[in-house]
Image: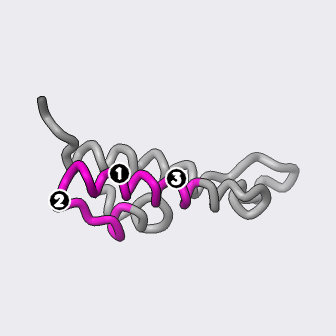
Amino acid sequence: MGGMTRMHFRAIARVFHNEYNRKHDKADGTADVGYESGYESALWRMSSRLASVFEGFNPNFDREKFIDACTQNEEGLE
């Protein structure tokens, strides 16, 4: 049975990244979901908790790179 690979971690990070950086359509079209409803904070906490689980799956897992890819830096998704 295969374990989780970099490809799996990147796919999950991409989902979080897209949600973390998503904009909701408001009257002016600029309202960021995260800052208005705690959405951003919840996504950060979930990515951090998943990183803890992933560390157990793969000894080479880079927690900091994963959380950064989930929340800010698209480079970790490449």
1 or 3: tag closer to the N-terminus: 3
**Quarter of the image that includes the N terminus:** top left
**Vertical placement of residue 24 versus 69, above or below:** above
| Quarter of image, res 64 | bottom left
Q: Which mark is residue 46?
A: 3
Q: Is residue 37 left or right of residue 45?
A: right
Q: Which residue is mark 2?
A: 59
**Vertical placement of residue 74 versus 9, above or below:** below
| Quarter of image, res 74 | bottom left
- Amino acid type at mark 3: Met
- Amino acid type at mark 2: Pro
Q: Is residue 59 magenta?
A: yes
- The image's colouring method is one colour
Residue 34 drawn at (x, y percent): 69, 59
Give 17 or 30, whichever is nearer the viewer: 17
Mark 3, residues whose alpha carbon is within 10 Å: few (<14), some, or many (≥20)? some
**Vertical placement of residue 44 versus 26, above or below:** below
Q: Gap in Å between the C-alphas at discs 3 and 2? A: 20 Å
Q: Is residue 17 left or right of residue 9?
A: right
3 or 2: tag closer to the N-terminus: 3
Residue sitting at 76 percent across and 46 percent down? Answer: 25
Q: Gap in Å between the C-alphas at discs 1 and 2? A: 11 Å
Residue 50 drawn at (x, y percent): 41, 51
Callout 3: SS: helix
Residue sitting at 84 percent across and 55 percent down? Answer: 28
From the image, give the main secondary structure of the stretch colored magenta.
helix
1 or 2: tag closer to the N-terminus: 1
Q: Which residue is mark 1?
A: 53
Give the magenta range: 43-66
Callout 1: SS: helix
Q: Is residue 44 left or right of residue 64?
A: right
